Amino acid sequence: MSLRAVKGMKDILPDEISKWHRLERAFRECVEAHGFREARFPIVEPTALFVRSIGETTDIVEKEMYTFTDRGDKSLTLRPEATASAVRAYVQHSVQGREPVTKWYYVGPMYRRERPAKGRYRQFYQAGIEVFGDPGPYVDAEVIDLVVGFIASLGITEVEVLINSIGGPETRRKYTAALLAYLEPHRDELCPDCQRRMGANPLRVLDCKVPRCGEIAADAPSMLKHLTDDDRAHFDELQATLTTLGTPYRVDGSLVRGLDYYTRTLFEVLGKGEALGAQNALLGGGRYDEMVKSFGGPDTPAIGFAVGLDRLLMAMPEVEPEAHVDVFVIAAQPTVRAEAALLGRELRDTGLRVESDLRGGSLKSQLRRADKMNARIAMILGESEVAAGAVQVKDLLEKTQQTVFRKEAAKRVHEILD
Ligand code: HAM
């Protein structure tokens, strides 16, 4: 039997990893510049955490979660997203008592048993932020502006920013009644899932991927027309702030998201380039003002987003892979391999990234390896060099070579690299 990775889950090998590092570094720098601090949550959580927050009638909970019973008979789930974990941690550690506004970010793998496709995986990576304690709408605009700026900084220019408001609980009550009145005559045309969801959570019908349900949803009453005065003022002020910030956006009154916890502001950024194919949602987010309270915490408004890193990478322009070593140390004869190992350590101690091939081999083959690794410098050590306390420093870019005292070698390399 040949063992392979689980369907929809992929290995990321070292040749690809520098792109990931670059992307993660850019994300960290961007959010840290806005005062966000990293939090790490477990990958496995109690199943009830996701059922109660994402919602029992969502696709994620009904069809996509990796849920299992552990040896202690507990139902556990591989996290399909991290907002629920952030809220659990925020409540569990009574964070609200420490600071009025909390700004967290996270980066890591998420798990959804969706049908694998280009840009859609069963293990995928998200980077996200969550802000607790600020009711908006100014922070909503700032969060949207942050992520739009982040995406632009990656060289991804063809994007569309969609925003909507689904209002708070009162708007939702009014809207649900209007939606049900609209859907009722179409009941028999809806898919069995939607017919069932009409009873439990009619808003989910708007998010159904079955084509006929989508057509019916397209003519549904607009949510924006049902906003209460407060919700409307919040949404208007969000738009005014985005305009002040110069952040491009388009209001899409039919935008819904596949998670139940949202209130008021919703947003998504779609990539428009060809690289993405059908899975063009680069990120999604929104406000979830009721969730902390529903988990037993104090009444705390919150907003956040998560970007799909796999999809961002697909949308990013190609760049040259980075070299991962500075110096390749070559033992010219098998007898000096111990000395070569020692030289490697001396160089690393000065902060250089050093590789060598201590199996030995011909000078030519070792030089070829140094080249292949994109090392800037090959440092050659033979019996005569050891005897003289010297090394050969070969600059593989400038194609120059010089003999230097061994104790000067690291300094010379740093000069070349600077
Ligand atoms: P989401 O829209 O479910 O939101 O996911 C956010 C992003 O994760 C998507 O826009 C997409 O780029 C990526 N993504 C989702 N599923 C997959 C998949 N199967 N394969 C590849 N990429 C995928 C959330 O997860 C919310 N927690 C966002 C949030 C944070 N809302 C408030 N705070």
Image (spheres, rainbow, N blue to C red):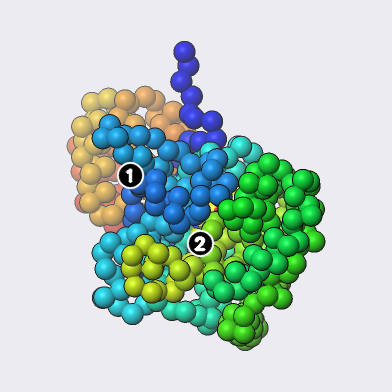
* Quadrant into which the C terminus falls: bottom left
Callout 2, which amino acid?
A: Tyr
Residue 181: where, in percent of width, then height? Answer: 73, 62
In the structure shown, which secondary structural element does the residue marked by tag 2 occupy? loop
**Quadrant of residue 84 in the image?**
bottom left
Structural crowding at the residue carrying mark 2, measured as other residues with C-alpha within 10 Å and reported as few (<14), some (14–19) or many (≥20) = some
In this view of the protein, which residue sits in the foreground, 338 or 138? 138
Drawn side of residue 34 relative to residue 348, left or right = right
At x 67%, y 48%, the residue is: 194
Numbered tag placed on residue 278 in the rendering: none
Residue 196: where, in percent of width, then height? Answer: 63, 46
In this view of the protein, which residue sits in the foreground, 404 or 377? 377
Vertical relation: 206 (above or below) 122: below
Structural crowding at the residue carrying mark 1, measured as other residues with C-alpha within 10 Å and reported as few (<14), some (14–19) or many (≥20) = many
Drawn side of residue 120 relative to residue 109, left or right = right
> Mark 1 sits on what residue?
354
Residue 415 at least partly seen = no
Ligand 1 falls in which quarter? bottom right
At x 48%, y 24%, the residue is: 4
Residue 374: where, in percent of width, then height? Answer: 47, 44
Callout 1, which amino acid?
A: Val
At x 42%, y 47%, the residue is: 79
> Mark 2 sits on what residue?
261
The answer to whether mark 2 is within 8 Å of ligand 1 is yes
At x 64%, y 65%, the residue is: 176
**Quadrant of residue 356 in the image?**
top left
Measured Cα–Cα span from mark 2 to mark 1: 50 Å
In this view of the protein, which residue sits in the foreground, 339 or 145? 145
